[in-house]
Amino acid sequence: MWVADIRSSSLKAGMIGGGFIAGVHARAVRAAGGVLHGIASSGPDRARRAAKALGAERAYASVDEMLEDRAVGIVHICSPHGTHARYARAALEAGKHVICEKPLAVTPSDAADLVATAAERGLVATVPFVYRYHPMAVEARARVASGSLGRVVSVRGAYLQEWRLAYDEDGWWTDPAATGPSRAFGDIGSHLGDLVSFVSGERITRVVATTRTVHGRGPAGTPLTTEDVAAVTVETAGGAIGTLMVSQMALGRKNHLFVEVSGLEANLLFEQESPNTLWYADRTDQRTVPRDTRHLSPEAARLSVLPGGHPMGYQDAFNAFVSDTYAAVRGAEPAELPTFRDGLEMVRLTQAVVDSAASGAWVEVGTAHTLQEV
C-alpha cells in the first residue's frame, strides 16, 4: 500500500463534494496549513465550479482520478450520507488518510468495517464532531471529569433547527438511498449524541425513541418516510438517565444545540449558539463562566486561541478539528480528536433510535468494541 509522505511538506487535501460543508472544510484546510489540491464531485462540470469557488488547485473528472493522484495525502468526504462508506473505504484502500462527514455510514456493519480498515492500514480516520472543539464544551468535559459535579445522575440535550419549515429546499436529503434509514437524527442527532457523551463522559447504552415524519413529501413532492423529529429517552453506562430531542421543524431555531449534565454536587450547561460561556451551578450559587484562559482547564485553554471577549465560533472549532487531524497524520495524539470509532458509536446509536421507534421498545446500543474486536 502506498501512503503519501507528508512529513516535509504541506499536507495536500482532496475533497469529494462541493456544497456548503465543503466550503467549511476548505477554510479549515488552509487554517491548518494544508493545501486544497483538488475537488471531485458528482460530475466534471460540478467539480470545476466547486474548484473555482473554493480555490482548489484543480478539478478531477472523477473520484477514482483523485484517489489515483499520489500528491493527495488526505481525503475530505463532503458528499451525501449514503456515499460516505463507499468513498471512505476507497480512500483508505488507496492509502489516503480520511476525514469523513457524519454519519460515517448508514449501517453499523459498514461503519465497523471502516474502523477495522483504517486500523489495519495504519491510517488516520476522523469524523467532524466539531462541537466538542468549542473551548467551553471542553471546559465542561474537564469539570465533569474532575469530579466537581459528583456522580452524574442525568443528562439532557437537544438539537433544534427550523430549515424544514423556513426554507423551501429540495435536494439529496429527500432520497432515502442518499440519507439511509434516518434523516434528522442521523444528520444532527449524531452531533448531539456525540456531544452528550463527550461532555458527560457517559456512554449511552440503551434508548427508547419516538419519531415523526411531519411532512410526508419534500418541496418537489417526493415521498418522505424518514423522520423530521425524534424524542429519545436514554440510559448510560454509569447509570444516568436522560433525554435527547432532535427536530428540523422548530421555527426560530437555527442551530440550537445544548447539553446539560446534572451531578449530585453541581450542574452545568453548554449552548452552541452561546459558545463563549458556560452556565454552572453548585450548592452555593449559580454563575456564568466566561471563556477566559486564566480560569480554564489546560485542555480548554489550548483551544482558546483568541483573547476573552473576542467571540469564537463554529469555524474556529472546525479549524481546530482539522488542525488536530493533520497533527495526528504527523504522529500527534490530540485528546479531543473524534475518530472513526466515535463515528461508529453514533451510527450504532442512530440505528438503535430507528429500531426503537419501529418497535416501541427499549433497544440496546451496539457494543463499543475495541479495534481488535471490530
Image (tube, rainbow, N blue to C red):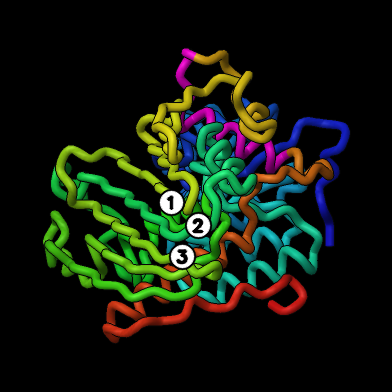
Cα–Cα gap, marks 2 and 1: 6 Å
**Quadrant showing the C terminus:** bottom right
The residue that appears at 32% across and 85% down in the rendered structure is 361
Mark 2 or mark 3, which has the lower sequence index?
2
Q: Please, what is the three-letter code of the amino acid marked with disc 3?
A: Ala
User: As rendered, which of 195 and 298 lies closer to the eye?
Assistant: 298
Label 3 CA crowd tier, 10 Å (few <14, some 14–19, many 20+): many
For residue 262, the mark is: 1
Which quarter of the figure is the N terminus placed in?
A: bottom right
The residue under label 3 is 240
Q: Which residue is mark 2?
A: 152
Of helix, strand and loop, which one carries label 2? strand
The disc labelled 2 sits on which kind of residue? Answer: Val
Report if the CB atoms under discs 2 and 1 are less than 8 Å apart: yes
The residue tagged with tag 1: helix, strand or loop?
strand
Of callouts 2 and 1, the N-terminal one? 2
Label ID, residue 48 = none
Numbered-mark total: 3
